[in-house]
Amino acid sequence: MATATYPPPPPYYKLYKEYSRDPNSAPAPPPPVQGAYVLYGANYTTDDVLPGLEEQGVRQLYPKGPNIDFKKELRSLNRELQLHFLELADVLVERPSQYARRVEEISLIFKNLHHLLNSLRPHQARATLIHILELQIQRRKQAVEDIKRRREEAQRLLSEALGTLEQ
C-alpha cells in the first residue's frame, strides 16, 4: 500500500484557477451562521444568552426577576452553604448512611452560586474594559505631559545655547 507524503488538494481548489490573474474571480466566503446549528452531534446556538436554572433542570434558590440583589443573594447562598457543610459533617459522624441527600443539597447550592456568578460576567467584562480604557487614558496623558516637559526642557537648552553663541 503506497501512501503520499502530501495528500491531494481538496476539489474546490479548481474554483481559484483564475485567482492569480483576477483576484475577484474567487467565490465569496459563506455567510456567518445565524441561530442554531449542529456540530459533532451537539446542538449549539449563536445567541449569547445564559440559560436559566429551570431550563437546565435545576431548582432556583434565589428569587426570579430582573432586579436581583446579587450581593445579598450571594451572601445568603454562602451562609446556606456553610450551614449545609456543617450539617454534612454532623451527618457523617452520626448517620453516615444519610450523607447523599446533604451532598445533593450542597451541589444544588453550588449550582445556584455558579449561575449567579455567571450572570455577573457581562457586568464584570464591562467594568474590566472601562478600567483598561481609563488606564490607557491615564498613560497617554502622562506621555503627553512627559513630551511637553521634555519639549520645554529642549527649548530651554536651545535658548541657553543661543545665548552662549550670541555672547
Image (cartoon, rainbow, N blue to C red):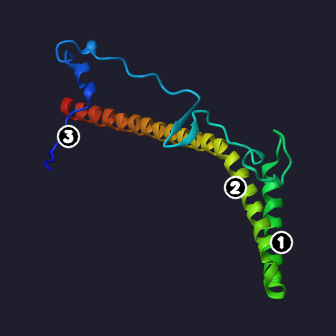
The answer to whether 122 appears left or right of 52 in the picture is: left
Q: Report which quarter residue 46 is drawn in.
A: top right
Sort mark 1 into few (<14), some (14-19) or many (20+) by Cα contacts within 10 Å. Answer: few
Picture residue at 35% right of the left edge, 34% below the top? 151
164 to 104, vertically: above or below: above
Q: Which of marks 2 and 3 is nearer the N terminus?
A: 3
Residue 95 point in image, percent of width and height: 83, 84
Instruction: Return the mark for residue 36.
Output: none
Q: Quickly name the residue at label 3.
A: 7
Instruction: Name the residue carrying label 1.
Output: 83
Please tell me in which quadrant of the rendered image residue 143 appears: top left
Q: Nearer the viewer, residue 57 or 53?
A: 57
Which residue is pictured at 83% across the width and 82% down the height? 90
Q: Position of residue 19 (x, y in %)?
A: 21, 17
Q: Counting other residues with Cα less than 10 Å from the Cα at mark 3, is it few (<14), some (14-19), or many (20 or more)?
A: few
Tell me the tag on residue 114: 2
Q: Residue at x 81, y 38 (%)?
A: 66
